[in-house]
Amino acid sequence: MSFKTIAGLLGAIMLLLGVAMAFPLAWSIHFEETAAIRAFIVSICSAFALGVLLIFVGRGGHPELRRREGLAVVALAWILAAAVGALPFTFSDTLPSYIDGYFEAMSGFTTTGSSVLEDIEGAPKGVLFWRDFTQWLGGMGIIVLFIAILPSLGVGGRHLFSSEIPGAVKEGLRPRIKDTALLLWEIYFVLSAAEVVLLKVQGMSTFDSMCHTFGTMATGGFSPKAASIAAYGSPMIELTVLVFMLFAATNFSLYFLVLRGNGFAVFRDIEWRVFIGVIAFCLLAVGAELVFRGVYTAPLEALRYSSFQVVSIVTTTGFMTADFDAWPAFSRLLLVALMFLGACSGSTGGSVKVLRAIVLVKYAYYTAYKVFRPQTVFTLRIGDRVFKGETVRDIVAFFIIFSAIFLFGSLAMAAMGLDLVTACTSVSATMGNVGPGLSGVGPTENFAAVPDGGKILLSLFMLMGRLELYTVLALVVPAFWKE
């Protein structure tokens, strides 16, 4: 394990983070927010100082980044990014403690969208912009951005890429991983720019349209409005955000195929078709119950709110147009189930992912079939992709570990005094990078009342969910740090 190599790369990432803080600083200057301006200047200097120190420590590191160093860099980079990203919240007195700031920053970078900020609209605009900008940086991945702009990391870049990019199958779109990273960010940027323009045309300010775009494309869900998307009361804005949430929750490699002339690549993808099918069933089921139970009298009104919340939850975005915690039990339970499903592999969405769910269902069916026909040999195929035994075992293990951590986390949160629903959904919402849960952490509440120990634990769950468990779990294995 080359600790110098790790330190040098972490230092470069901290410098990149310091540069990123210049954008919210510009907004603070625009709005003449003196306290926020000071907070960002101090935070930028701190990021640069830490970056220079780490680069100095990393002098003479191994020129080739190996697999283990790649895992360590990715996990530690996200931990340090949240530590530095918390500084503007703390120095501007937007949040009462550094732990709160760390929770908010980790929630942003991991695109979770869970918040401890109680007076959202009373916070400095520059800080709110930073809060949303962290989501956008974390959506496609700060490491993927780092790979895209760094001259060359060789095979080391591939190790970094595969450790951060979400999904059951991690593959490059182009032979050089740097070109793949750059292409992903180009697609991400173009879609983001398109949403900013559309939201602005529909009446949002430039500031609000950028902040909501950051939350949409990263499937993060932070909003500069306390009432989230509901604050605008506009069906067209809701439809625009809904469509771009679906764009963000689609495997970005499919856009690459579309750009190469395969216009129907998205519609032919089995994972995407299942994803859309689940959404269609759930929004109709929720809408029907909302009408049947008298929550809404008009079917179209029920469909408007059910469709937005179903898409918002399953894409792990977490925007809100209604208090779904006040909906009937069936609808609430269905939304909680969608928290565990999540978006497509290779998207900016979180949780288990649709592809893994398909593999698990097929594997369970084949296993049951072999009970009475044990000689049958199956090949687990999804579309034109064949999943070999090792990959299937990895997916089964992922689900088992995910479920075990959810159970442990729920018990731990309950031990801290949270009620059953709050404890369970606080863990599912953070592990799945969804944002809001139910009851005490519901859509009209926040995580401010969670004890500090719980905030630290939930911050860890956010990181594990974003990096899909193994990258973080590797850090606690002693053999990982030995040659």
Image (spheres, rainbow, N blue to C red):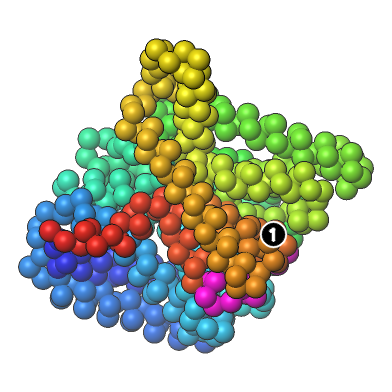
Highlighted range, magenta: 443-455
Q: Quadrant of residue 68 in the image?
A: bottom left
Please tell me which residue is depicted at 39% across the width and 12% down the height of the picture: 375
Q: Quadrant of residue 11 in the image?
A: bottom left
Along the line of sight, the residue nearer the viewer: 207 or 415: 415
Please tell me which residue is depicted at 22% across the width and 35% down the height of the picture: 175
Please tell me which residue is depicted at 30% across the width and 56% down the height of the picture: 474
- Residue 451: in magenta span: yes
Where residue 403 sits in the image (x, y, percent)?
Answer: 51, 49
Along the line of sight, the residue nearer the viewer: 306 or 196: 306
Determine whether the residue tagged by mark 1 lies in a helix, strand or loop. Answer: helix
Where residue 441 sits in the image (x, y, percent)?
Answer: 67, 64
Majority secondary structure of magenta residues:
loop
Q: Is 54 placed above or below 300 here?
A: below
Where residue 146 sits in the image (x, y, percent)?
Answer: 29, 57
Q: Is 263 placed above or below 481 here?
A: above
Q: Is residue 117 visible?
A: no
> Is residue 384 shown left or right of residue 322?
left
Q: Quadrant of the C terminus?
A: bottom left
Please tell me which residue is depicted at 27% across the width and 35% down the height of the picture: 174
Q: Residues within 10 Å of mark 1 (few under 14, many from 20)?
A: some
| Mark count | 1
Where residue 224 sits in the image (x, y, percent)?
Answer: 63, 66
Along the line of sight, the residue nearer the viewer: 264 or 392: 392
> Is residue 227 shown left or right of residue 63?
right
- At label 1, the amino acid type is Val
- Residue 321: in magenta span: no
Q: Which residue is mark 1?
A: 421
Q: Is residue 394 visible?
A: yes
> Is residue 104 shown left or right of residue 252?
right
